Amino acid sequence: MIPASDPYIRFEDVHVRYTELVHGLRGVSLSVQAGEFVFFVGPTGAGKSTLIKLLTREVRHDSGRVLLAGRDLGKMRSRDIPALRRQMGIVPQDFALLPRKKVWENVAYAMRAAGHSRKAVRTRVPELLERVNLAHRLDAYPHELSGGEQQRAAIARALINEPPLLLADEPTGNLDPDHSWEIMELLQKLNAKGTTVLVASHDMVVVDRMNRRIVRLEEGLVASDSHVPPTQAVAEEPTPNADSEELDVHE
Amino acid sequence: MSDWLEFVIGEAFLALRRNLLFTFAAITTVAMALFLIGGFAYTYYQADRYIHALPTQLEVRVFLKDGMPQDVVTQLGGSIQNLAGEASSVFISKETAWDKMRADHPDYPNDLENPLPDAYTVTFKSVEAATAGAATLANDPAVDKVVYLKELAAELKRGLSVLRYVGYCGLVLLFVGGIIIFNAIELTVVARRREVRIMQLVGASIATIRIPFVLEGTIHGVLGGAVAAGFLAGANAVVGESVRGLGRTIPAYPWLPVSLIMVAAGALIGFLCSTIATRAMVRF
């Protein structure tokens, strides 16, 4: 585990202003260790998605610093963004599957676009679909899949680069409770294998049931953080589910 | 590398197929624009060359009526030598002129009848003498036509100025063609926004995302250039045939360099317009 002094992700007094009147973040500071599973929760407009988009560099902060693996994302040049995104898996809320392509073609297309060879595509696509329990639906079109299956296909696509970081923006936003839980279990499995998982969600039923670190955002500020210090987590947490004493850090 | 090339080229052709209407519009507009500009440029080039190849302003060509007896021809030669300010004169028989023309144009059919008349080329010592001499010779009963090249050159130059307007119209059309390619690429980007988004999400390189669109625009331009080159060759053949019917000729059409220039120009327009459109639409 990376020492607490050297977190994998760090937001330092980050401000994001979309317009004069609309603020995304108003001074957020928080750290995430490698291998953590963190939920960003809060009402619409609280800044959950903005935090995720800062890491993917879809949004740039106006002040403060955003560090990923020690790298200042604010100083990153535009041409380096594709390489940054190959280091992370991104799962959007709307699945973003291509409707005219079958499940395996959706994953294969993403792999080809990301620069993988045809040979790699042939071997890895079945593996990835197996990993998300979708191997039996590889020839189905997106409209033939349930919401949960579509989201699993989107997760398979997010894993094409074997990323150490998985970012999911409202991954259960369009799903019923059963499928939501199915997706969360999948994310939990990936996390158990060492992937750092950050999830923006307002689905408090699922979030509470997961019993993971919860960062609550309100009006662009961190209202609370159930962060368990790494030393304590190591001592107390033999299994991925044993954390979540909520600490109020908002003053 | 070959995998990557296959991917970007495949994406470009997929977009061409899915966007048929705009593909057609872009290609035809570029073709029309290049046809006008290319036609203008080619005609202008040939006319300009012709003007520069003309003799000095002191020279007058005197074409005789057909079937004039030898003594009349000789008598006219004597009259020419007596003209005020005459410096020299040369008789060019219709056979000599025809032999020279056939040597210059070996592609002419063998059964073509000699349409050329007997002629004198007269050089004067001054422009004033040439003008007066041309007027005198025009009234001679043995003379069919006098071509005073000063006037011919002036008329050709007037013709060239008209051609310039045609060229301006071509430029306007080329601009319109560029806008259509720009719009076609923009629409393609919009139509393929899901693919673009996915490529951005999974970290596809900027080149991987943009090159298919640039390739698509360049193909629009290349095809437009090729169609324009075809039209130009056809137009040249039609003009050549018409002129031949009047007993005159036009220079041999250099179809290969002209076609290559047209295709290259089309490719350049397509490349530039699609690059600008893609840079505007696909941002990081």
Image: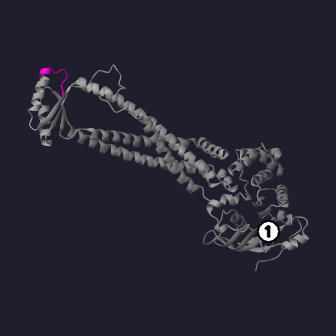
Q: Quadrant of residue A59?
A: bottom right
- Whole-percent x and y of residue A83? 68, 58
Q: Amino acid at mark 1?
A: Gln
The residue tagged with tag 1: helix, strand or loop? loop
User: Is residue B211 covered in magenta?
Assistant: no
**Whole-percent x and y of residue A220?**
70, 72
Please give the name of the residue rendered at 37% of the width and 45% of the height, measured from the top-left corner.
B167
Q: Is residue A169 visible?
A: no
Screen quadrant of the C terminus of chain A? bottom right
Quarter in which the N terminus of chain A is drawn: bottom right
Is residue A68 something one can see in this rendering? yes
Residue A37 placement, left or right of B272: right
Q: Does residue A186 lie above or below B165 as drawn?
A: below
Nearest the camera: A196 or B72? B72
Question: Which percent across, then down, holds residue B63?
Answer: 19, 29
Residue B175 percent across, percent down from the top left: 45, 49
Quickly name the residue at label 1.
Answer: A33
In the image, taking residue B11 as reference, residue B128 lies left or right, namely: left
Foreground pick, B280 / A176: B280
Q: For the magenta stretch, what is the residue range?
A: B62-71
Q: Is residue B69 magenta?
A: yes
